[in-house]
Structures are given as C-alpha cells and as structure tokens.
Image (cartoon, rainbow, N blue to C red):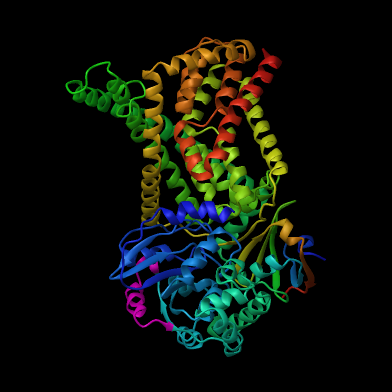
Amino acid sequence: MCLSQIKRGECVRVLRIDSDVIRAQLIRLGICEGSCLTCQERIPFGPFMVRHNRQEIAIGREIANCISVAREVAA
Amino acid sequence: MSSECSCHGRCATPEPPSVTGRKIVLSGNPNVGKSVFFGVLTGIYNEVSNYPGTTVEISRGRYRDDLVMDTPGIYGVASFNDEERVARDIILDADIIVNVVDGMHLERDLFLTQQLIDMGKPIVVALNFMDEVEKSDIRLDIGKLSEMLGVTVVPTTAIRRKGLQEVMEAIDHARPGRQDPELVRLLFPSMQEHTGSQAEGLMVMEGDEAVAERLGVRPGKDRERFYLERRNRVNNLTRSVITELKTRPRLSRFLGRAAVNPVTGIPVMGFMLWLMYQVIGVWVAGDIVGFTEETVMQGRYEPWVRKLLAGVVPADSFLDQILTGEFGMLTMTITYLAGLLLPLVLGFYLFLAVLEDSGYLPRLATLVDRVMTFFGLNGRAVIPIILGFGCVQLGTITTRLLGTNREKSIATAILNFTVPCSAQIGVIAGMLAAVGGGLAPLYVAVIFTVLAVLGTVLNKALPGKSSALLIDLPPMRLPRLDNVVRKTLTRSWYFMREATPWFLLGSFIVATLQATGGLQNWQKALTPFTEGWLQIPPEAATAFVMGLVRRDFGAAGLTELAMSPSQVVVSLVVITLFVPCIASLMILFKERGPREATVVWAGSWLVAFLVGGILSQAII
C-alpha cells in the first residue's frame, strides 16, 4: 500500500520511495526506507501529518502517493 | 531560470562591507534561531521566525574584522530550490561556519551538520533551544556529541542570550570535524583531478549540476549512497547522545493537531480571520487610519507643508502641482505612506509575527493545501494571499517564499487581479452595507468565481509543475512579546524603505500627467466604456483613473455617485478587479520583471471590464 492509504493513528514502515528527488529530500528530514511513521492526522483529499520520532511533518498527497509502506503493529 | 531572477534581486541588494578578514557563515535548518545569532554577532537585528523558510534575503554584517553572512534555513546543502542554491554558494565560499542546531530535532538537524563536516569546512556547532530540551522528556550528552562530531558544541538558548558569548569565543578555534574515512577516500581522487576544494568535490559527487558545470566536470551519480550513509551515521549519533525519559503527550502537540484537523481547524481558521478583520479591517483601517490620515496628516501636516512652500514655490506653477497638488509628492504621497500604509503594514506584520512564532502558519498551510492545489499552488501560498488582503504589495513581496517560479507567477497574478487590499475593503464594505443585504453575497460570489477561474486557468496554461507540500511542523509555542515587536518593527521598516521610492516615482508620473492635461484626456477616452458597456454613470471614469493611483481612492470616488444598488455592485466588481495601484505595480515590476508585470496590468483592465460588463448585462 502507499502512504496515502494510511489511517489516523496507524503506524507504518517505509518500504520504497519512487522518486529520486523526494527520496533525497525525505532522507534529509530523517525519513528513509525502513523508517517508522505514525499518522497524526489526515486531511480529506489533502496532505498527511505524520510523526517520525519527535518530528511532525506535513506530506502533500502527491508525495504520499509515491511512498510505499507496510503496516506495523502499534508500539 | 527561477533561481536567476530571484537571486538577482537578493544577491544584488545588500552591499558587502569591505572586509579583510574571514567569511563567517551562519547555517542551519529553518527556524533554529540563526537570525538571533546574526543579530548578536553583528549588532543588527534581523528576524527570527517560525515559518519554514522565511529568511529569503541574505543578511550581511561585520563581526570584528570578519564578514558575517546569514543564509536561508535549509535541510542540507544541495539545489532543490532557490533558497538552497543561494545557501549552497555562500557556504561553498565560507571560511568558518557557525552551524545552529535545534536541540529538540537532532535527528533532522545533524544531517546538515554532518554534511558541512563532510565538506571539510571548519565549524562550530551551537546547540540551540536548550531551555526547551531541559523542560522536555529528553536529555542530551553534549560532551559525547562534540567528541563524535569532532567539533566544539556550545549549548545555547539564543532568545535569552545564553551561551552566545561562548559561541563567539569558539569561532576562533573552529576546526574541521570528523569525516567519514571511507568518504574521504572516495572524494580524494576526484578532488585532485579538478578542484582544490573538498567542499566542491563533495557537491559534484552528490550530483549538484550547477557546481559540476562551473568546474567543467560531470555531476556524480552517488547522491543517494552518500545521503543514506550519512543518514545512518546521524541516526547512530543521535541514538548515542539522546536519553529518553518517559514520554507524555503535551498540550502543544494537542493544539498542533487541532489546528490541522479540518473539524477543529476550519473554525480555528475562521476565528483567526474574523479576529484579523476586526483588528486590522475595522480598528486599524477605520479608527487608527481615520486619526493618522485625516486628523494628523491631512489636518496638520498638509496645511503645514503647503504653508512652508507657499513663499518658495509660486502658486499653481508646474512645480507646485507636482509637490503639493492633488497627487502631490509632498502632500498625497507622504500622507498615504505615513497616515495609511504604515499603520496597516504594522498591523499586518504584527499578526504575521504572532502567527509565525506560535507555529500556526505551517499548520494553516497544511489545512488549506488541498484547496490551493486547484490553482497550482501548495499550502504555503496562503501566507502571501493573507498578507495581500492587508496590502497587495506586502503579498507580492512575500511570494518570494514559494518554491518555484511557476508558483510565484500564479500567486502574484491572483493577488494583483482579485485580492482587494484592506484600504479598499473598508470602502467596499461600507458601500455594500448601504445598498442592502441581498447584493453583498453577489459581489463576494463574483470575486471568488473570478479567483477560482483565474487560478485554474493559470494552473492549466503555465508550463511546468508546481512543488507539492513537504514541510516540517515546528512545535506550537507561545510567542515572546519582545521578539514579536522587534520582528514587526524590522519588517515594517524594510517594507516602507522598499515601497517609498516607488510610490514617490508613481505619484510623480501621475502628478505630471495631471499638470500637463494628460489625465483629463484619459478620463474622456474611458467614458464610452463606462456608460455604454458597464451602464454606470460616466463620472465613474474619474474613479477608475483614481484607482490607477490608489485602489481605495478608486472605491472612494464611487461613493459620491448616485447609483442604483445593481450599479453599485457592478462598479465595485470593476474597481476590485481593476489594475493594482501604482505602488503595487512598481513592486510587481521589480519582483516579476517587465513582461509579466505588463501582462498582469493589461490583463486586469480586460478582466475588470469584461466581468463587470457581463454582470451589468445580466443584472441591470
């Protein structure tokens, strides 16, 4: 599944990021393949607010669509 | 292309103080408090902000014999947007780097730190927001961090001036940090081949096309490998220096989420806009401006300056018209700047500072992102649009913070075509209230339709692709009064300094036209349009001519006319969509270049008369 299918409160692990530029930008923010993200809030048809460790990040839907993730059991 | 034109405006303006010493460059992620360090080092207050990427202009100053430069907040040295390109070039040129790091976000911030170390530059790390770290649920081992990075790490709380002295002392002992030996091994051969600088070598290997082109080599393809390897090092590092105490959800996190969730976020946004309208639209634009413009400037200042010149300049001479006539440079222009524009600009920048420092703006950007994507913008564009309601010039200047040239063009067009400024809103609201309830929604609906159509058309028509939203959300914080006040004053000062000469030039042109009779001819030429096509009194042409100079002048000119309610709505629609005022036009030329500015200006004539005419044919 991709990040845009995430539900609020769900934890996911990043499997693949399908864009070189976005991958590089996310690595700098701390997110890479293997990172765990928690969905804090999803805005209908809009961006996703995820938390990665102590950092909150807003990710536009277009970007979320190119991030493949797998569900994790919430810690 | 975008980098060229916007960089031109930025890099060309500040004149570098002639310095024989070293170049000290401040670098860090957005919102880490770099600007406070800059202020303390150089003695000039810059600004501190909470909206990612506000420091779009480069500040230069002097510390002892050294040149100090502030750079835009970046997450790494590369060229993903204009700000990064600017920062990259300044960093490549630096002798010493002061890297400001947010103690609460080590994992994110140390990526840049490690990259700067990999570039081989001597650096000092200022570990900022230590007060927040102490109150939070984490503890940092600063000694270990310093040892692992191989550079001096100074704990600071810049806003309370803690640790700044130590940072200044550390600058003289800045040294290159611990580089990854494997990386140096890879870097060395390529470095020897084409450049003497390790920093440039790293940029080339990380695939930076501009740097590669400058050196005449091909950009490397290993960016991702370098990035991932660096990310791993940073993750290991943070794991060994951070101790987590027990976590508990904080109030600020709850508030932060409430601002983004549409169910709570939309009422919060509505309340914020209402409050802004009450304070700026009603109180400042009404009561304060009523006092400053009418009582102080027109009541005291203008008679005084006229009297002063009466003995020197012959009455009704050409010079008299230019200086103290209807559009006089010493009368109308100064009254407008000091009596009207200054209070409004102060009011808007005060709101902006509070919203920024509280951490609300990036959340608002997240909330409205979806709506903005219809117009080829992302959520960040909400900032210039909101400021545009204060003053279109303010909004146009702020479009600098948008990611691509395409987005800047779209936002500028929306601002200059459809957004009425606060001075105009006051007059319009009064006239709509006078004609009764039914027609005000019609006016609002027409303007919003034009905005939506314009945004959608531009999004389809302009080539290229806009950037999607990707921003980090800083924690919600209570703004500090001194910081808010200083920021408001600094920005208002810079804004007035930028706008004043252009406005003087504009009024000089109009006053000359009036003195030579050009204005009257223009009025006559416009008459067939008003009477025939728009079906409003021919005198309205005068109001449109006034609207060329100042938008609220235009609207105010309409209040004098005897019109039916439908005619009032038609004329207000036309005056709202009409060309930006002289001062905005000047800023438009400066920011977007003559070609785009001309298209926007000529386009507003067309759109205003076209939409007004269609509406007139439908309702009158």
Q: Is residue B171 above or below residue B314?
A: below
| Left or right of residue A46: residue B23 | left
Q: Is residue B9 above or below residue B586?
A: below
Q: Nearer the viewer, residue B149 or B527?
A: B527
Say if residue B264 shows up in the picture: no
Q: Find residue B319 and report its horizontal and vertical position in percent.
A: 28, 23
Residue at image position (56%, 27%) is: B578
In which quadrant is the N terminus of chain B drawn? bottom right
Residue furthest to the right in view is A1
Q: Nearer the viewer, residue B342 or B61?
A: B61
Q: Find residue B215 and report its horizontal and vertical position in percent.
A: 56, 72
Q: Is residue B75 above or below residue B513?
A: below
Say if residue B53 shows up in the picture: yes
Q: Find residue B150 and report its horizontal and vertical position in percent.
A: 47, 87
The residues colored magenta run: B158-175
**Overall secondary structure of the magenta section:** helix
Say if the magenta span includes residue A6: no
Q: Nearer the viewer, residue B415 or B160?
A: B415
Residue at image position (59%, 89%) is: B185
Q: Could you say which quadrant of the image residue B254 lies in?
A: bottom right
| Left or right of residue B463: residue B521 | left
Residue furthest to the left in view is B311
In which quadrant is the C terminus of chain B drawn? top right
Q: Find residue B396 and report its horizontal and vertical position in percent.
A: 51, 43
| Left or right of residue B569: residue B13 | left
